Image: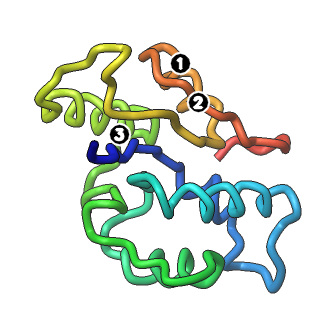
Amino acid sequence: MEEVLTMIIFNLDAILDNCENRDDIDERVCPVIYIFDSLRRRNEINIWTGRYESIRNKTLDSIESIVSGDWCLHKYLLKMRPEGDNTPEVMLKERWLDELIISNPIGWDYMKQPIEFVVDICHKSIKMWKRRGVFVFDVNQGEKDF
């Protein structure tokens, strides 16, 4: 039987948390990076971010600098905000979710949903994922809402 990869979505800030602006990685982010690194070997990992498409290469460099091994992001795995789109990030993610549902040939059945779970750091996005019936890990351990 062919193994089916599950889709897991990470919010970019849940992984990086501004790590590219520091010499060391924040201790509270290290567990998320470890989980990301472990899951990416057996699952389809998508990273969704409100960052603009124009900084894709810089974003890829940032990810590659903190993730171990042979990490290679294909274009479809890193979903970025189109240039000129100022939609609030939570609305952008919900639009992307709707596009994913529409493109899924089996529809949106709880037992067959294309997303296994989401790892996010933004309270507004976390509320949206829950409202839409997607299991979400809240990794925001601080006061700041991204």
Disc 2, SS: strand
Whole-percent x and y of residue 124? 58, 29
Point out which mark residue 92 bears.
3
Instruction: Left or right? Give the position of 74 relative to 146.
Output: left
Where 120 falls versus 21 (above or below)?
A: above
**Contact flag, marks 3 and 1 (Cβ < 8 Å):** no
Quadrant where the image shows the N terminus: top left
Identify the coloring.
rainbow
Residue pictured at 88% horizontal, 63% vertical: 27
Disc 3, SS: helix
Which tag, 1 or 2, sits closer to the chain's start? 1
Residue pictured at 39% horizontal, 82% vertical: 57
Point out which mark residue 130 bears.
1
Could you say which quadrant of the image residue 144 lies in?
Answer: top right
Point out which mark residue 136 bears.
2
Which tag, 3 or 1, sits closer to the chain's start? 3
**Contact flag, marks 1 and 2 (Cβ < 8 Å):** yes
Amino acid marked by disc 1: Lys
Amino acid marked by disc 2: Val
Amino acid marked by disc 3: Leu
